[in-house]
Amino acid sequence: MRNLPSDEEPAKIAVIGAGISGLSAAIHARELGADVHLFEASPRVGGWIRTSRSDSWTLEWGPNSILPSSHCLIDLARRVGLESQWQNADRCARKRFIWKDGALRALPTSPLTIPFSRALSPAGWCRFLMEPWIGRGGCEEESVSTFFRRRFGSEAARVLADVMVSGVSGGRAEWLEIDSFQPKLRQWEKQYGSVISGLLRSRLAPSGPLRRTATLVEGLEQLPHALAAELADRCHLESPIVAMEPHNGRWRLQQGGAYFSDTVDVDGVILAIPATPAATLLQPLSSRAGEILQSIPYASLTVVQIGYDASKCRIRPEGFGFLVPSSESLGILGTIWSSSLFPSRCPAGESLATVFMGGSRHPDQIDESDTMLQDRAIGALRTAQGIDLDPHMVQLRRAPRSIPQPYRGHRRKVAALRDELRRWPALAMAGSHLDGLSLESCARSGRDAAHQVYSILNCEEGSP
Ligand SMILES: Cc1cc2nc3c(=O)[nH]c(=O)nc-3n(C[C@H](O)[C@H](O)[C@H](O)COP(=O)(O)OP(=O)(O)OC[C@H]3O[C@@H](n4cnc5c(N)ncnc54)[C@H](O)[C@@H]3O)c2cc1C
């Protein structure tokens, strides 16, 4: 056993960063029995999860919704009494579109609808459907686009891999590593010899409590607020941790905020902050860890929310939204038809579109003026949907360096980082830059970090 002060005195664990990764880590560590303190640099919890609500508009500036397979996240919400607050998206959410050759093209919703989809040419779909007969292959650190080309053909790689990557991460399919970006696809290839077969089997697997893509009734920020309320006075806002060092078998944290003394001593630490601030904290302890973290690239996004009169559109927004392949020149990455998914997000008679811009494809857009970005977003909707009137509501926010990019070699880097951190047993990391950027992956990384640190403190002679 670790040398704790007494049986009654639980291990004291500091979680640094109150995004979803840190909140998940804090809730799980507390449930395990630790004395948890969560330190957040900003005046609010949630990190990139940001919802604003005014005049009957509910605007999501970060994540918009979660998948029904987000078991860890759903479990986290249940632990803080939010199970009745989930709101399933409208049935039309299954319909997704891409902008191609001057029109919105529906993606197939099932194998039976493939012949009707013009997202790929007939030859492109034929090659796509040959996937179950393509043998296993590929190499370590294969890119998403090479993986798609090998399994589904070059047209699918050019169009489908391209929009999947830019829609999820604002990144580029040639640069991202399949094993880090969508490990499930590679796993299905290895396990069943086919991605399509794995996908069909996954649809037969028992589903969780949600039927479809979902949100919370007051928007996704309801979750971090409820998690922070559960932690009560153990959640310290405006309390950045500016340095950390091993001290007498424990950790000594230096805190830059106003509410605590300058230093806090704890038994274990969970770092749930993005790669760049994590590199700053770890650099003095391990230049190797600092270098690895600094080398993880990030993409920036800009989000433009546009409210308009749907009855004046040539194409009524019905479905999840549309994505734009890099071969097209619409100037945006894609659009979520937010009010088609969740009608309660805007006043009656209005429609709400959430437009995403920037990413690795347009890295300079983050520096453009608000007016330029808004005009480009409105112009893209006019072209794609034929909106005649000026929008009634336009708002914009930037998300600089918000999306970590798992380039080829990312898994190797993360393994090397974890190896390096093993020098300090009661130290773990969580966050979107490690094993996936979805809210579900972040919640899981927080949970796993809590279990790792807690079990080390309670089962082994482990100390900094
Ligand atoms: C525009 C956008 C759309 C997205 N859409 C989706 C989606 O639809 N579905 C989905 O699943 N995911 C989506 N994501 C991704 C997902 O939101 C993020 O990956 C996730 O929220 C990251 O959570 P995190 O806790 O790891 O990091 P963060 O949210 O970055 O939180 C880290 C926290 O650490 C704090 N911090 C930093 N340094 C310190 C320090 N020294 N001391 C104390 N605190 C510190 C920060 O202030 C911050 O609050 C989206 C992201 C963005 C930006």
Image (cartoon, rainbow, N blue to C red):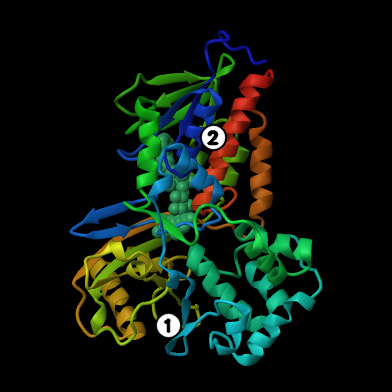
State the residue at coordinates (53%, 16%): 10
From the viewer's perspective, is residue 412 above or below residue 142? above
The amino acid type of the residue labelled 1 equals: Ser
- The N terminus lies in which quarter of the figure? top right
Residue 18 can be seen, yes or no: yes
The percent coordinates of residue 375 (x first, y second) are 26, 75
* Mark 1 Cα shell of 10 Å, populated few (<14), some (14-19), many (≥20): few
Q: Is residue 113 depicted above or below 337 in this figure?
A: below
Image x and y of residue 410, in percent: 63, 54
Mark 1 lies on residue = 329
Residue depth check, mark 2 versus mark 1: number of the one nearer the observer: 1
The residue carrying mark 2 has its beta carbon less than 8 Å from ligand 1: no
**Residue at disc 2, secondary structure:** helix
Which quadrant holds residue 268?
A: top right
Quarter holding the C terminus? Answer: top right
Residue depicted at x 67% and y 81%? 128
Q: Looking at this rendering, what residue extends furthest in the right direction?
A: 135
Seen from the viewer's position, the closer of residues 97 and 429 is 97
- Does 167 sit left or right of 238 as displayed? right
The vertical placement of 114 against 301, above or below, is below
**The label number, if any, that marks residue 282 in the structure image:** 2
Q: Secondary structure at mark 1?
A: loop
Q: Position of residue 78 (x, y in %)?
A: 46, 41
Q: Residue at x 62, y 91 (%)?
A: 122
Q: Is residue 92 left or right of residue 416?
A: left
Residue type of the residue flagged with mark 2:
Leu
> Is residue 197 toward the left or the right of residue 440 in the image?
right
Residue at 69% x, 81% y is 129
Question: Farthest residue toward the top?
Answer: 6
Q: Are marks 2 and 1 in contact (CB under 8 Å)?
A: no
Give the image location of residue 316, x and y in percent. Answer: 33, 81
Place residue 318 in its image quadrant. Answer: bottom left
